Image (spheres, grey):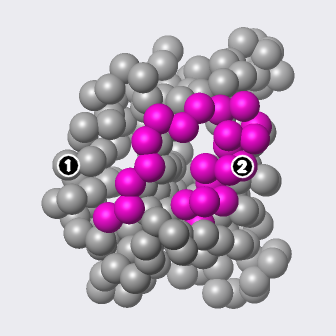
Amino acid sequence: MGSDEHRAQAPHTVNFVVITLSDRRTKEDDYSGKVIREALTVAGHREIAYELIPNDSHALENLIEQFAQRRDVDVIITTGGTGISRKDITIETLTPKLQKKLDGFGEIFRMLSYQRIGSAAIMSRAMAGVMNGKVVICLPGSADAVKLAITEILLNELGHMVWEAKK
């Protein structure tokens, strides 16, 4: 069965959670979190929860573990903490928790980013993987980067990713 047949069998609606990591943003000015939530909701997906936490590995671990155990969650999307500064802890915190890593997501995201922003794309460590049958996607904190990931990759593949992760 090819990817077109897989997409046809995949769910058209997925239940998602958004976690924003930021020491500066509030829920009122979290543009990246808002972009994710609005784009996925408009596309027919269901928001289960939205959290904004500081760049703290323990807080992120606790939230991810809680959401990964919930039956009503298919996808966990983080925004922020994927860069190379000391405060960027998302990748180091979540990589050990993944049973599978989807290297192609980060590769394609960086390729698309390179086409838009040039060589600065090398500093993105955006990634995706599977934890407990849930799709986990780690996006940068930039609203433009989030829009790129959502429109060019996730709106096309999210249901397919969930379908595969649950098999």
Residue type indicated by callout 2:
Ala
Instruction: Verify whether residue 39 appears in magenta.
Output: yes
Q: Which mark is residue 134?
A: none
Say above or below: 47 vs 164: below
Residue type indicated by callout 1:
Asn
Q: Which mark is residue 39?
A: 2
Between 141 and 119, the residue placed more toward the observer is 141
Q: Which of the 4 image quadrants contains residue 143?
A: bottom right
Helix, strand or loop at mark 1: helix
Q: CA distance from mark 1 to mark 2?
A: 26 Å
In the picture, measured across the screen, residue 78 lies left or right of residue 9, that is left
Image point (22%, 64%), residue name? 57
Residue 52 in the image: state x and y as whole percent. Answer: 38, 62
Helix, strand or loop at mark 2: helix
Which of the two discs, 1 and 2, labels the residue nearer the N terminus?
2
Image point (43%, 72%), residue name? 26
Between 104 and 20, the residue placed more toward the observer is 20
Between 46 and 83, the residue placed more toward the observer is 46
Residue 139 in the image: state x and y as whole percent. Answer: 54, 62
Q: Which of the 4 image quadrants contains residue 41?
A: top right
Q: Nearer the viewer, mark 1 or mark 2?
A: 2
Image point (37%, 86%), residue name? 85
How many residues crowd mark 1 within 10 Å: few (<14), some (14–19), many (20+)? few
- Total labels: the figure holds 2
Any part of residue 20 in sight: yes
Residue 133 in the image: state x and y as whole percent. Answer: 40, 26
Image point (37%, 20%), residue name? 71
Tell me where the magenta segment starts and ends, as one range.
32-53
Instruction: Verify whether residue 51 appears in magenta.
Output: yes
Q: Which mark is residue 62?
A: 1
Residue 120 in the image: state x and y as whole percent. Answer: 64, 87
Any part of residue 2 in sight: no
